[in-house]
Image: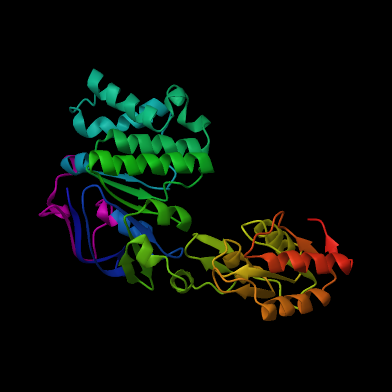
């Protein structure tokens, strides 16, 4: 089933939150909404689920207008998971998941054996079978989130709408949940629209990303098109710190001032030291790093001074002399490299010079 919006405006009452949204989501595709808090991501999802009426424009399921689909039929086609807390009275987790089957039951709401098999398959898929007989009130927020996902899955929808599905989850369950959502899209052909705050996860799981800013769709594209240096900073209005688009990683602001410590890094070994010095409020310099070194983006974000060489180039005499001059102005040198190859022979010599000067410290 194809989900399509045409010049959609969403909001509350007469107040528009997002204007002019025209997008198509194909079966098997994951579209992720990103943007600052209050941008309107949840409002868009609620409108796609017919919980809110559009202020203008139209939502289509295939060629049929969403507003013309009967409630029970819509519940069989579209499932919505919100971050809003629900408060079911005296219900076990299995009861909550089973409520996803009600669009398929008769007026008495009695579940068949096949309905219960679907319920337990959904619970197994998100690893909450052990919670089946537990009261929904007695479990953690993260467990509740997984119960509600199982409920949505048990509806057997063709379109899955998820508002911050990884909220309250630890890293293990975030990865498990997103892997499962990816499988649902790929194996069952669900069209998935979700919002995420974890940009690193959005970059990895999404087929396309819709960026919302200043009350309108700002950019729509693949992760490779969206996560480019500078754009995420502009989308979120970052004034402090940086965001490295390739790694999906934010960094806190650098400590400015004359460098007190020089870090000889490279190959990822310098990153923990850079971050520790930043936390301690110590301005530092680092080098010599090739610009394609994994340390480089973190060093560029956190170092008061970065001495670098072009990718795959040997450390030139000029770059070596510059680094040595900075070292001599520092009170300490930390060498993170255990071995030195031909490309960073200059760093081995810098370590030797620091040792001779009595500046070399362990890390």
Q: Position of residue 85 (x, y in %)?
A: 44, 44
Q: Where is residue 252 in the image (x, y as percent from the top left)?
A: 62, 66
Q: Is residue 18 above or below residue 91?
A: below
Q: In this view, does 197 lie above or below 112?
A: below
Q: Identify the residue shown where x is 79% and y is 73%.
A: 327
On the picture, is 1 further left or further right than 328?
left
Q: Identify the residue shown where x is 47% and y is 24%.
A: 134
On the picture, is 195 further left or further right than 237?
left
Q: Identify the residue shown where x is 37% and y is 61%.
A: 223
Q: Where is residue 351 in the image (x, y as percent from the top left)?
A: 78, 65
**In the foreground, 329 or 252:** 329
On the picture, is 343 further left or further right than 211?
right
Looking at the rendering, the stretch of residues picked out in magenta corresponds to: 47-72
Q: In which quarter of the image is residue 153?
A: top left
On the picture, is 107 further left or further right than 141?
left
Asked if the magenta segment contains residue 53, the reply would be yes
Q: Where is residue 319 in the image (x, y as percent from the top left)?
A: 67, 78
Please tell me how many numbered marks the rendered image carries.
0
**In the foreground, 298 or 167:** 298
Q: Quadrant of residue 71?
A: top left
Can residue 91 be seen here? The reply is: no
Furthest-front residue in view?
A: 342
**In the foreground, 188 or 130:** 188
Q: What is the quadrant of the C terminus in the image? A: bottom right
Asked if the magenta segment contains residue 193, the reply would be no
């Amino acid at each position: 089933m194809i989900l399509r919006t045409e010049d959609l405006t969403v909001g509350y009452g007469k107040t528009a939150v997002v204007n002019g949204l025209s997008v198509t989501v194909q079966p098997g595709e994951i579209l992720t909404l990103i943007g600052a808090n209050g941008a309107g991501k949840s409002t868009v999802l609620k409108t796609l689920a017919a919980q809110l009426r559009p202020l203008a424009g139209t939502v289509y399921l295939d060629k049929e207008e969403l507003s013309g689909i009967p409630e029970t039929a819509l519940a069989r086609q579209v499932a919505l998971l919100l971050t809003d807390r629900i408060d079911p009275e005296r219900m076990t987790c299995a009861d909550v998941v089973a409520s996803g089957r009600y669009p398929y039951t008769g007026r008495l709401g009695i579940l068949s054996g096949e309905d219960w098999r679907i319920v337990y398959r959904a619970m197994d898929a998100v690893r909450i079978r052990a919670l089946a007989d537990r009261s929904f009130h007695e479990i953690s927020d993260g467990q509740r989130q997984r119960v509600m996902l199982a409920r949505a899955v048990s509806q057997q929808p063709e379109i899955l709408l998820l508002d911050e599905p990884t909220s309250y989850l630890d890293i293990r369950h975030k990865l498990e949940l997103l892997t499962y959502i990816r499988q649902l899209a790929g194996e069952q052909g669900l069209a998935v629209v979700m919002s995420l705050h974890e940009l690193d996860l959005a970059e990895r799981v999404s087929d396309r990303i819709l960026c919302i800013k200043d009350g309108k769709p700002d950019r729509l594209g693949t992760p490779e098109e969206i996560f480019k240096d500078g754009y995420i900073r502009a989308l979120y209005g970052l004034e402090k710190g940086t965001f490295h688009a390739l790694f999906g990683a934010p960094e806190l602001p650098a400590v400015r001032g004359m460098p007190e410590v020089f870090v000889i890094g490279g190959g990822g070994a310098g990153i923990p030291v850079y971050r520790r010095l930043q936390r301690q409020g110590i301005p530092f310099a680092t080098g010599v790093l090739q610009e394609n070194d994994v340390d480089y983006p973190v060093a560029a974000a956190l170092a008061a001074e970065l001495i670098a060489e072009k990718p795959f180039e040997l450390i030139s005499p000029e770059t070596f002399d510059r680094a040595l001059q900075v070292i001599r102005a520092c009170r300490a040198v930390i060498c993170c490299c255990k071995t030195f190859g031909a490309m960073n022979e200059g760093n081995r010599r810098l370590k030797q010079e620091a040792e001779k000067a009595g500046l070399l410290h362990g890390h």
